[in-house]
Image: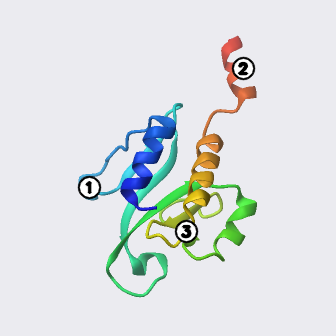
Amino acid sequence: MDRKQLLDWVYGQYGTEPEYLWKKYPNYAVLRNSAGKWYGAVMDVPKSKIGLDGEETVDILDVKCDPLLIGSLCMQQGFFQAYHMNKENWIGIMLDGSADEEQIKGLLDMSYQLTMPKLKRAGKQQKR
């Protein structure tokens, strides 16, 4: 899965349009769920920034993840500790074909749900 395929999929799945928030980083896109919370960030970073050899840039995706899965995912090809996000709750994924497309979609679904308000909390807010 590359950047274009990813952005096409999240638009079809969630209706998400990427937001480009930083002039200094015009290729950095934020993905927000229907509650307005970030569930993904797509960036192009030098390989050296994520622990790989070389200075050429590579597209990556950061998603929120169950902390219990992060350690085992980081042992798989195409996964690494999140770039510029909380490494206990977020994971980075290479968008170069090295990570399985279905696994990326599953992790995006997880991230989307993890960043939604809790039903319990939403119910309390509605009662006020």
- Picture quadrant where residue 45 is located: bottom left
Residue 90, label in figure: none
Outermost residue toward the top?
A: 128
Q: Residue at x 31, y 47 (%)?
A: 20
Residue 26, label in figure: 1
Residue 99, label in figure: 3
Q: Which residue is mark 2?
A: 123
Mark 3 residue type: Ala
Q: Residue at x 61, y 54 (%)?
A: 107
Dot placed on the residue nearer the N-terminal end, 3 or 1? 1
Residue in the foreground of this view, choosing between 65 and 78: 78
Outermost residue toward the bottom?
A: 53
Outermost residue toward the left?
A: 23
- Where does the image place residue 64, in percent across and percent down from the top left? 60, 53
Dot placed on the residue nearer the N-terminal end, 1 or 2? 1
- Where does the image place residue 21, in percent across and percent down from the top left? 32, 47
Q: Using the numbered discs, state the Cα–Cα distance from disc 2 to disc 3 in whole angstroms.
A: 38 Å
Q: Using the numbered discs, state the Cα–Cα distance from disc 3 to disc 1 in whole angstroms.
A: 24 Å
Q: Residue at x 41, y 62 (%)?
A: 2
SS of the residue under disc 2: helix
- Where does the image place residue 4, in percent across and percent down from the top left? 36, 55
Residue 81, compared with residue 5, is above or below; it is below
- Picture quadrant where residue 28 is located: bottom left
Whether the residues at callouts 2 and 3 have beta carbons within 8 Å, the answer is no
